[in-house]
Amino acid sequence: MKKNHIEAWNKCLDIIKDNIPYQSFKTWFEPILPVKLEDSTLTIQVPSQFFYEWIEEHYIDLLKKTITKELGPDGQLEYSILMESSYGNSSPITVKAPTSNRKVLKNPIVSMPIDINRGTSKDIPNPFVIPGLKKIQIPSQLNENYSFENFVEGDCNRLARSAGYAVAENPGKTAFNPLLLYCPTGLGKTHLAHAIGIQIKHNFPEKIVLYVQFDQFINQYIDAVRNNNQNDFMHFYQMIDVLIIDDIQFIAEKPGTQNAFFHIFNHLHQRGGQIVVTSDKAPIDMKGIEPRLLSRFKWGLSADLQVPDLETRIAIIEKKLYNNGIEMPRDVVEYLAYNITTNVRELEGALISLLAQSSLNKKAITLELARQIIDKFIKNNSREISIDYIQKVVCDYFNIHIDMLNSKTRKREIVQARQLSMFFSKKLTKASLASIGTHCGNKDHATVLHACRTVNNLIETDKQFKGYVEELEKKIKL
């Protein structure tokens, strides 16, 4: 009996529902409508271009397997995307899926060396494939979305990005070997690590590149010890041309894993292989790691990624919007950038929440919608008020441009706005006086203290000024 498009899609949904969290299913799959089924090609309608991009980026593998299971090996999926015109009309366009090009990231098929110590000619087990396969191909495990093109450069990450690009252009032959990228979570070290691997694969397709999260490496080593084939495990990793290890800090207090990685590191380094590692802390702050291994982390370059400044946060949002073919009012972009200051991951999470709500509820993206969505997001994520945000609120209140605030002008209204910015920065943030002064036109700490005293004196003597301060404080804390 021939399936119709509704029946086929419902069966696909049953499989998908069992493989992803319930909330994700409700958000990303319930709004989808099946359109038609012709010649093993199922067409589904999604609410927007953003929906299509999100599903392809995060669920394309699951969809491929599901479509193959339900429609057979020739099964195909197409999206019908509702595109909003400037006149408020909706018209569907059809996009064939998948559009991703992952062939370039595949490693060449290789023959593993003989384990001399064990005296056997069998291929060394590949911990990334099902045992028993004769041909050995090591998956790169690179995420094609984390490319240099999608990485926004700013003062906060310029050194790390430049070093990473230099490594990608000449792996194993620069002074940056190993390259250690470190920063707190959510600031881009994993993205940059993937970007290095992707660029190397583009430049040198014949090289074997492997990205591994360190907890995966640990589990593989434990399996090797359990099965008494540590030598096979070591030889497997010594075959890699470019080894990228994410979250190396988890190696602490694990002497067996440290010893194995030490020998792998030495072998790769001596034969000119490139090593890239990431960590949530600098080498000097790493505890529980053997000195001989720690010293090797310091051989090359250790580059940190810092919290992005306001301009970089705005650029990150605009890049994400451009990649998804979405337009957003400038005041909304600035509102996000001023409010989400902690890390890139939270910034992108807030943007996705706003876009999802706009798509699902068919609402235009406005500053008011942004406030409703993002304020809840910030509240749930322990919002910290930033100096940038304080300056933005003060400048908006007095209707002056933020560049004037940081200029050398002595106009009374500008000086007063600058002093209020310093006052609220000292009162509502944890920033030092020197940091506040730097943000407010490169003033010294004495100028900041003078500004705070001036504001306090005016609060006590000028009722109108006191009203300004109270209104501003409410706006900043909104």
Image (spheres, rainbow, N blue to C red):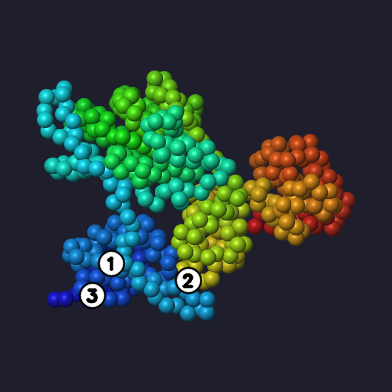
The residue sitting at 45% across, 50% down in the picture is 149
Which residue corresponds to mark 1?
77
| Front residue of this view, candidates 443 and 13 | 443
At mark 1, the secondary structure is: strand
Please report whichever mark, 1 or 2, sits nearer to the chain's N-terminal start: 1
Q: Quadrant of residue 136?
A: top left
Which residue corresponds to mark 3?
38
| Front residue of this view, candidates 468 and 395 | 395
Identify whether 33 is placed above or below 28.
below
The residue sitting at 38% across, 73% down in the picture is 93
State the CA–CA distance, disc 1 to disc 2. Answer: 25 Å
* Disc 3 residue crowd, few under 14, some 14–19, many 20+, Cα 10 Å: few
The quarter of the rendered structure image containing the C terminus is: bottom right
Say what amino acid the circle numbered 2 marks: Asn
* Disc 1 residue crowd, few under 14, some 14–19, many 20+, Cα 10 Å: many
State the CA–CA distance, disc 3 to disc 1. Answer: 10 Å
| Front residue of this view, candidates 92 and 369 | 92
Judge depth for marks 2 and 3 and give the one in front: 3
Q: Residue furthest top?
A: 292
Which residue corresponds to mark 2?
361
The residue sitting at 13% across, 42% down in the picture is 134
Say what amino acid the circle numbered 1 marks: Leu
State the CA–CA distance, disc 2 to disc 3. Answer: 30 Å
